[in-house]
Amino acid sequence: MMLIVRLAINVFALFVVDYLVAGFELANIQAGIVAAVAIGVVNTFIRPILHIIALPISILTFGIFALIINVLLLWGTSKLVPGFVIDSFMTAFVGSILLSLVSWFMQRLASD
């Protein structure tokens, strides 16, 4: 049950970012669900490996490189999912930060 709640929160967060950030576009609800699942899979399996590999660079840049990895993974996911479009790196950067904040806030609300 909690998995469905998290999926719904992530889909909602994607649509909030879609509404607020120009160049971050979701075609429909199906694209939002597929994008949320794809982002979840990428964050579960690929992101930890990349963070471990890039740990020395991340330490040298005080964690900014970890943020760049997250942005690139979000942007790459948009290239794989039809109906999910991110126009530029800066759009992905702003969208990534906003997506993290909205998801975090909604997760905190759901846990109470």
Image (cartoon, rainbow, N blue to C red):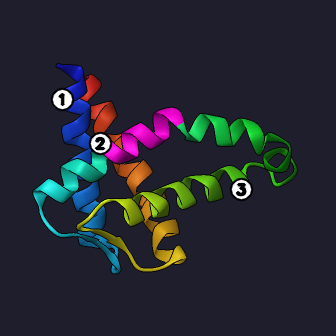
- Asked if the residues shown at circle 1 and circle 2 are in contact, with their CB atoms under 8 angstroms apart, the answer is no
Three-letter amino acid code at disc 3? Ile
Three-letter amino acid code at disc 2? Val
Q: Which residue is mark 1?
A: 4
Q: In the image, 8: left or right of 61?
A: left
Secondary structure at numbered mark 2: helix
**3 or 1: mark nearer the eye:** 1
Q: Which residue is mark 2?
A: 37
In reply to whether residue 11 is colored magenta, the answer given is no
Quarter the C terminus occupies: top left
Q: Which residue is mark 3?
A: 64
Q: Is residue 86 visible?
A: yes
Secondary structure at numbered mark 3: helix
Q: In the image, 93: left or right of 19?
A: right
Q: Is residue 36 above or below residue 6?
A: below
- Asked if the residues shown at circle 3 and circle 2 are in contact, with their CB atoms under 8 angstroms apart, the answer is no
Q: Nearer the viewer, residue 104 or 93?
A: 93
Instruction: Give the magenta-colored segment's residue range.
Output: 37-45
Three-letter amino acid code at disc 1? Ile
Q: Earlier in the sequence, mark 1 or mark 2?
A: 1
Q: Nearer the viewer, residue 1 or 35?
A: 35
- Percent of width and height locating residue 52: 73, 35
Q: Is residue 93 above or below residue 69?
A: below
- Percent of width and height locating residue 9: 23, 41
**Distance Cα–Cα, label 1 vs label 2:** 11 Å
The dominant secondary structure in magenta is: helix
Q: Residue at x 22, y 60 (%)?
A: 15
Mark 3 surroundings: few (<14), some (14-19) or many (≥20) residues within 10 A: few
